[in-house]
Amino acid sequence: MKTVHGSQFTVHGQKGLTLIEVLIALTILSIGLLGVALMQVTSISGGMFGREMAVSTTLGQDMLEKLRTLEYTSLTTDNALLSGNHPDSTDVSDGLAVGVGSANITDERGQTTGPQIYTRTWSVTDSSPATNMKTLTVTISWTAKGAAHSIIMTGVKVRS
């Protein structure tokens, strides 16, 4: 038996946790949970950027395919394969008018109505890389979180 300030008590063994131990454990747990939360935010942000990249790639591939379906010799009837730069509002043959209306801005479905974040343009270069060939270059640009992004896709149209 021990005496402290006139009181007697028996020490049999320490049971339970002290307040300091609980506070230290809670601090370590909260630091770990904060790290997990920050990883989640980063993951969501990366997923959104991946989605934007996938949409822009789809829009670019769609335009390349539309340009490849045009006749090489339709230079007098279809402006899409004339040499030079073209905004998305240029008509593509047989009713495939892409982006008719509000300039060259499109949404993720390729429409010109609704929230529009993608700009799609293309250029045509004659006799490149060889004669009887045209190089088609499609550029998709967008701005996300204040940063400008773009992808460039290139294809070749051969005279058949």
Image (cartoon, helix red, strand yellow):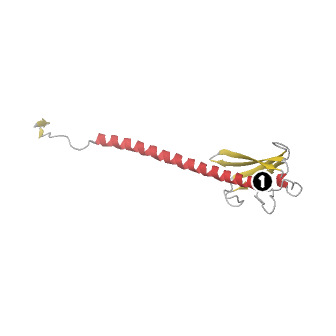
Q: Where does residue 149 sit, x and y in percent of width and height?
A: 67, 45
Which residue is denoted by mark 1 in the rendering? 68
**In the displayed structure image, the side of residue 6 where residue 45 appears, left or right:** right
- Amino acid type shown at disc 1: Arg
**In the displayed structure image, the side of residue 49 where residue 93 appears, left or right:** right
Q: Is residue 68 visible?
A: yes
Q: Where does residue 152 sit, x and y in percent of width and height?
A: 72, 45
Q: Residue 92 versus residue 157: which sits nearer the camera?
A: 157
Q: Where does residue 45 sit, x and y in percent of width and height?
A: 56, 48
For image coordinates 76% across by 56% down, the residue present is 66
**In the displayed structure image, the side of residue 118 where residue 25 appears, left or right:** left
* Mark 1: few/some/many CA within 10 Å (<14, 14-19, 20+): some
The N terminus: image quadrant: top left
Q: Where does residue 86 sit, x and y in percent of width and height?
A: 80, 51
Q: Residue 65 versus residue 46: which sits nearer the camera?
A: 65
**In the displayed structure image, the side of residue 121 where residue 56 appears, left or right:** left
Which SS class for mark 1? Answer: helix
